[in-house]
Image: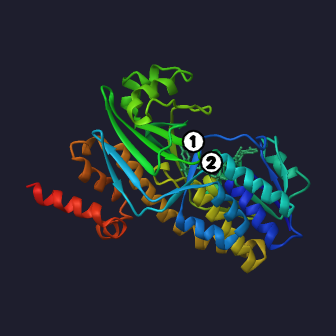
Amino acid sequence: MRILVLGGGPAGLYFSLLMKKLEPTHDVVVLERNAPSDTFGWGVVFSAKTMSSLRETDPETYAAISAASETWDNVDVVHRGEKISIRGNDFGGVARIDVIQLLQRRCHELGVELRFRTNVTEWSGLAALGGPPDLLVGADGLNSLVRQAHAADFGPTLDAGRNRYIWLGTPRLFHGLTLIFKQTPAGVLAAHAYKFSKTRSTFIVECPEETWAAGPLAGWSEAETPARLAEVFREELGGEPLLSNASRWIRFTLVKNRRWTTGNVVLLGDAAHTAHFSIGSGTKLAMEDAIALARSFAAHREVGPALAAFEAERKPKVDAYQEVAYGSLLWFERVKDLLHLDPIPFAYRLMTRSGKVDHENLRRRDPAFIEAYERQLRRTP
Ligand SMILES: Cc1cc2nc3c(=O)[nH]c(=O)nc-3n(C[C@H](O)[C@H](O)[C@H](O)COP(=O)(O)OP(=O)(O)OC[C@H]3O[C@@H](n4cnc5c(N)ncnc54)[C@H](O)[C@@H]3O)c2cc1C
C-alpha cells in the first residue's frame, strides 16, 4: 500500500512507523514543512496510562520516551502564596523536540521516508505527488490543509477560547504539575509549570482576554514579555528567567469535525481534534489516534473498512475526552469567581473541575489531602 502522510508531528510520525512495522512492504512517505530539528513550545505531558499503551504498542518508542522523561506524582496548587500538594497523580514530562526526534529515528530504522522542508501549499500539489496514494493521512495539525480541502465532508468547527496564553520555558525546575494563581492589579494570571528535563520546565501563563488587554501585558513587546512576566512570577521562579521559543500570546482553538474520514483520506491528531492544554493531552491523543488507526489496519487490511472501523471506535472516545477538556478550559476562564476560597478548598475545586476525578477518587490518590479538606469543611460553618 502507498501511504502519504502530511505532517511530521507526533500523530504522523507515530502512525507511519506503526504501519511500516505492521507491513514492511508498505511505501510510507511523510511530508513535513519544517527541518528535523525545528520545534515549537517546550515540554509535553504523558500520564502513566498513556505510557503503558505506548509500551504495548512499540516497546522501542516507549523505552526512548521513558528514558527522556521526568516523572512525578504530585499536583501543587499555589493560591494566595500557599502551596497545597496533592499526591497520587502519576505523570511524566518530556521535551517536545525529544519526542519528535526519537520518532524520526524510529521512522528511519523502520524505513519510513521522511521528506523535510516540504511545505505543501496546494491540495492539487499534494494529490499529484507521485500519483494518488492508497491512503492519505492529514496529520498536519491545527491549521490542517487536508481538513480545509475536504471541509464539506469533514464538517469542521473551530472555536477560540476566551483566555490568552503564552507557552514559555524556564531553567527553574518545578517538580510535579504546579498551578500558580497570581493576583495582579490587572487581574489573575494562572501559570501551568512542570519540569520536562534535567534542566528545563514548561511555564505556560494564561489570563482572561480583559486582563491581558487592560493590563500592561498587551503593551509589552514580544521580546520583552518573558522578562516582564519573570518579574511578575519572581518569587515562584526563585529569580530564574523565563525563556521564549517564538512564544506569543494566543488563544486556544477548539477543533472538532463531524467526520474524520472521507474516501481514502483520514485526519489524525490536532487536525481532527484539540484538547485544552490544562489537561495536557494533545500529544497523547495524537499518538493514541495513531495506535487506533494502525490497529484498525491490522484487523481490516482494506482502506475503506479500516477507516470506517477506526472512526467508529475512536471518535466517540475523543468526543468524550474533548468534553472533559472543555470543562477544564471553562474552569480556568472562570477562576476569578473562586479566588475567595481558601487554598485547600480552592485546590479541591481545581482537582475535581472536569468531573473526571471525584471525592472518592481523590481520597484514593491522597487520603491526607482529603482529610485536610474534610477537616476544613467541618470548621467552616
Ligand atoms: C500551550 C500548549 C501546551 C501544550 N501542552 C501539551 C502537553 O503538556 N501535553 C501534550 O500532550 N500536548 C500538549 N499540547 C498539544 C500538542 O502540542 C499537540 O496536541 C500535538 O503536537 C498534536 O500533534 P499532531 O501530530 O496532531 O500535530 P502537530 O504536532 O501540530 O504536527 C503537525 C505537523 O504538520 C506539519 N505541517 C502542517 N501543515 C503542513 C503543510 N502544509 N506542509 C507540510 N507540513 C505541514 C507541521 O509543521 C507539524 O510538524 C500543547 C499545546 C499547546 C499550544
On the picture, is 102 further left or further right than 172? right
200 vs 134: above or below: above
On the picture, is 149 further left or further right than 364? right
303 vs 72: above or below: below
* Residue at 41% from the left image edge and 49% from the top image edge: 329
Q: Position of residue 139 (x, y in %)?
A: 70, 54
The Cα–Cα distance between marks 1 and 2, rounded to whole angstroms, is: 9 Å
Q: Residues within 10 Å of mark 1 (few under 14, many from 20)?
A: many
| Residue beneath disc 1 | 200
Q: Amino acid at mark 2?
A: Ala
Give whichever of discs 1 and 2 has the lower sequence position.
Answer: 2
* Residue at 53% from the left image edge and 42% from the top image edge: 202
Q: Quadrant of the C terminus?
A: bottom left
- Mark 1 in CB contact with mark 2 (< 8 angstroms): yes
| Residue beneath disc 2 | 95
Residue placed most toward the observer, 181 or 187? 181
Q: Is there any visible trace of residue 334 in the rendered image?
A: yes
Q: Position of residue 54 (x, y in %)?
A: 64, 67
Q: Amino acid at mark 1?
A: Arg
